[in-house]
């Protein structure tokens, strides 16, 4: 019922949203007679602010069409390498038009970026992918909004996520692959590689784990506290709702994106209020560069997806409440997850000094679990002054974290 009421509210707001957008343009367009009226800038800014607060945000595009390497521009084409009901494996294929360019690209290590399935779309890692493309052949997991997956495809559990990661690694080729997991997927990625190693399969050249909840008993954050202070029945009754028609996934039980978004905002309400007030002031004062920066950020931040209920509840129980991975008690399809079985894969863990999502020490816990990896092939890196978002996007990612990853891949290729 809650999901249906949300959809009704969205439909009710839609006409006013379109009207606000039109009025903002009418008062803001230099050729409009309304633009000449006193206070037109304030009217235009106010209408746009309402429009952006009320509008529906669709999934953004990666929009990566070229990359500069050694001063040359190489075209980039986004291709679907593999498709499964709940995820697409995307390949950002770079092209060269001469022998020298082909040789340059051929030397690039291959990297699989496992994006989080935790509310936002994989495009949240656009900066991660764009930067990696300078020196690497890049793949990324593009998780599909659960409301768009027909109910006949069945449920999707955390075990299925692990199976997807294993399949993607095999498809690309483990023997030449480096895997980067950002936030939530650090747990299923570590599980997937552990299971592959235990079965005697080839494992990736290296694993990079960034800001993830390997052991949430270390330095718990506000996110961890919520997961541990509420019983499982609360999550199932309060956060899980069926997808309403006319979506393809009608009837599927999900953790809706709009509830997740409310949770994101509730973590830092003052910051978001100030950001929107600054946006209004920037529009009034004509500071279009800062206003456009606000638009780009919230176009991504406000675009959310529904998570399959089974996967979400599994994650809360296994990762945040029972801590099965660090305690050595996790079994996936009858096979024990034992990271100490990983031997031929290098490990780099990355944490943000000010991370308020995955506290310091939670990702580093992987170092204690992967005892089969020689000390010479294990590293830990703390990004000073960086929060959660800053370790994979923005200035600190490009100037501090990426050079570390690039050199680590080169050393272990």
Image (cartoon, rainbow, N blue to C red):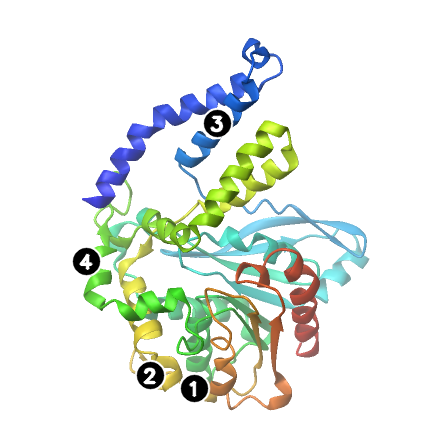
Describe the element under mark 1 as helix, strand or loop: helix
Residue at the location (47% across, 86% down)?
369
Q: Nearer the viewer, residue 232 or 94?
A: 232
Circle nearer the N terminus (4, 3) = 3
Residue at the location (60% across, 41% down)?
293
Circle nearer the N terminus (4, 2) = 4
Describe the element under mark 2 as helix, strand or loop: strand
Circle nearer the N terminus (1, 2) = 1
According to the picture, the residue beneath numbered tag 2 turns out to be 335
State how far apart marks 2 and 3 are (Cα): 57 Å
Judge left or right: residue 248 versus residue 71.
left
Q: Would residue 244 be seen by someone viewing this image from the given angle?
A: no
Please name which of the two marks, 1 or 4, marks the residue nearer to the observer. Answer: 4
Q: Would residue 278 be seen by someone viewing this image from the given angle?
A: yes
Query: Label 1 neighbourhood size at 10 Å, few (<14), some (14-19), many (20+)?
Result: some
Residue 65 in the image: state x and y as whole percent: 64, 45
Residue at the location (33% across, 71% down)?
159
Please name which of the two marks, 4 or 2, marks the residue nearer to the observer. Answer: 4
In the image, residue 174 sits, relative to residue 302, either above or below, namely below
Residues at marks 1 and 3 touching, judged by CB atoms closer than 8 Å: no
State how far apart marks 4 and 3 are (Cα): 38 Å
Instruction: Find residue 318 and report its image quarter.
Output: bottom left
According to the picture, the residue beneath numbered tag 3 turns out to be 46
According to the picture, the residue beneath numbered tag 4 turns out to be 237
Query: Label 3 neighbourhood size at 10 Å, few (<14), some (14-19), many (20+)?
Result: some
Query: Label 4 neighbourhood size at 10 Å, few (<14), some (14-19), many (20+)?
Result: few
According to the picture, the residue beneath numbered tag 1 turns out to be 198
Query: Label 2 neighbourhood size at 10 Å, few (<14), some (14-19), many (20+)?
Result: few
Circle nearer the N terminus (2, 3) = 3
Residues at marks 1 and 2 touching, judged by CB atoms closer than 8 Å: yes
């Amino acid at each position: 019922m809650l999901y249906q009421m949300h959809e009704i509210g969205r439909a009710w707001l839609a006409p006013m949203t379109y009207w606000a957008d039109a009025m903002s343009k009418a008062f803001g367009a230099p050729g409009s007679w309304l633009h000449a009226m006193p206070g037109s800038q304030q009217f235009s800014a106010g209408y746009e602010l309402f429009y952006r607060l009320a509008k529906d945000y669709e999934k953004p595009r990666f929009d990566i069409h070229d990359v500069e390497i050694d001063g040359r521009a190489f075209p980039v084409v986004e291709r679907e390498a593999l498709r499964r009901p709940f995820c697409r494996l995307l390949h950002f294929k770079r092209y060269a038009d001469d022998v020298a360019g082909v040789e340059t690209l051929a030397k690039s290590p291959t990297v699989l970026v496992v994006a989080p399935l935790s509310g936002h779309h994989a495009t949240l890692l656009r900066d991660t992918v764009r930067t990696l493309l300078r020196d690497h052949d890049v793949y990324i997991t593009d998780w599909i909004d659960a409301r768009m997956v027909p109910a006949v495809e069945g449920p999707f559990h955390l075990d299925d996520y692990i199976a997807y990661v294993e399949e993607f690694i095999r498809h690309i080729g483990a023997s030449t692959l480096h895997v980067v997991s950002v936030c939530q997927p650090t747990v299923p990625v570590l599980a997937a590689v552990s299971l592959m190693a235990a079965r005697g399969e080839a494992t990736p050249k290296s694993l990079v784990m960034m800001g993830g909840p390997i052991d949430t008993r270390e330095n718990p954050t506000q996110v961890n506290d919520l997961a541990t202070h509420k019983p499982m029945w609360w999550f199932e009754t309060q956060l899980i709702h069926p997808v309403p028609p006319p979506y393809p996934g009608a009837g599927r039980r999900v953790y809706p994106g709009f509830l997740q978004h409310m949770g994101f905002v509730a973590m830092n309400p003052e910051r978001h209020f100030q950001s929107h007030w600054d946006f209004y002031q920037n529009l009034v004062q004509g500071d279009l560069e800062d206003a456009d920066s606000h638009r780009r950020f919230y176009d991504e931040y406000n675009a959310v997806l529904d998570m399959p209920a089974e996967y979400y509840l599994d994650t809360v129980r296994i990762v945040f409440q029972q801590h099965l991975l660090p305690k050595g008690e996790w079994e996936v399809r009858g096979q024990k997850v034992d990271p100490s079985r990983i031997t031929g894969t290098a490990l780099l863990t990355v944490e943000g000094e000010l991370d308020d999502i995955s506290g310091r020490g939670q990702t580093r816990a992987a170092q204690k679990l992967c005892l089969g990896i020689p000390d010479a092939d294990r590293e830990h890196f703390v990004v000073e002054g960086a929060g959660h978002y800053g370790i994979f996007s923005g200035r600190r990612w490009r100037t501090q974290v990426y050079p570390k990853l690039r050199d680590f891949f080169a050393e272990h290729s």
